[in-house]
Every structure is written in C-alpha cells, then in structure tokens.
C-alpha cells in the first residue's frame, strides 16, 4: 500500500512539544521537513538581520526621518 502523507505546518510552543515531535520522527511516524529553530545558519541569520535593518531604514526614509544616499554617492564609495 502506498500512502502519500499530508503536510501540516505547526507552531511549537515549548521544548516538550519539540522533543515529542523528534521522538515521533525517530520511530518513522512523521517526517520533519523544515525546522525554523535549527535550519538557520549564522549566514542566514545575518542576512535576515541585514534585510530587516534595510526595511527599517527604508521606512524611516519614507517618513522623512532620515535621508538616504543617492546612487552617485553609493557608486563613489565603491
């Protein structure tokens, strides 16, 4: 019998739930496809932090609280 499983996204609230899911995975009852708590490499964390910082800066510029550099200024820095 071939059974194609369903995919379910859940939010894990504590470590007990995480350990339970890991146990279920070990006995082949479930398969964890992605775990946001463990799949973030230091490089991915830095990229996410940089992206959020850029978004914050863009929002401040839209509100007129800061002035962004022009394209010419950025090119001159290179």
Image (tube, helix red, strand yellow):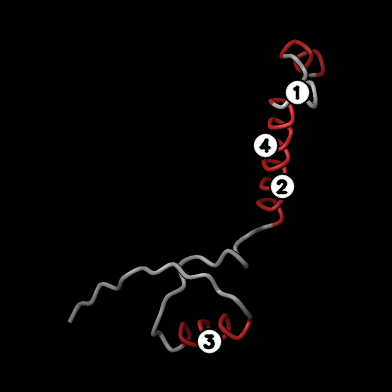
In the rendered image, residue 15, in percent from the top left (x then y), is placed at: 63, 81
- Numbered badge on residue 20: 3
Q: Mark 4 or 3, which is nearer the eye? A: 4
* Quarter holding residue 14: bottom right
Q: How busy is the neighbourhood of tag 1: few (under 14 within 10 Å), some, or many (20 plus)?
A: few
Residue corresponding to mark 4: 55
In the rendered image, residue 4, in percent from the top left (x then y), is placed at: 25, 72
- The answer to whether 72 is drawn above or below residue 32 in the figure is above
Is the residue under label 4 in contact with that under label 2 (CB below 8 Å)? no
Q: Earlier in the sequence, mark 1 or mark 2?
A: 2
Q: How busy is the neighbourhood of tag 3: few (under 14 within 10 Å), some, or many (20 plus)?
A: few
Q: Kindly report the distance in space between the C-alpha atoms of the residues bearing marks 2 and 4.
A: 10 Å
* Element class at badge 3: helix
Q: Kindly report the distance in space between the C-alpha atoms of the residues bearing marks 1 and 2.
A: 23 Å
| Relative to 13, 4 lies left or right | left
- Numbered badge on residue 25: none
Residue corresponding to mark 1: 64
- Numbered badge on residue 49: 2
Q: Kindly report the distance in space between the C-alpha atoms of the residues bearing marks 1 and 3.
A: 49 Å
């Amino acid at each position: 019998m071939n059974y194609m499983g369903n995919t379910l996204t859940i939010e894990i609230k504590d470590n007990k739930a995480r350990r339970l899911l890991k146990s279920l995975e070990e006995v082949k009852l479930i398969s964890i496809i992605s775990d946001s708590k463990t799949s973030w490499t230091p490089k991915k964390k830095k990229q996410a932090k940089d992206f959020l910082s850029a978004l914050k800066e863009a929002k401040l510029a839209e509100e007129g609280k800061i002035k962004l550099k022009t394209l010419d200024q950025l090119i001159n820095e290179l």
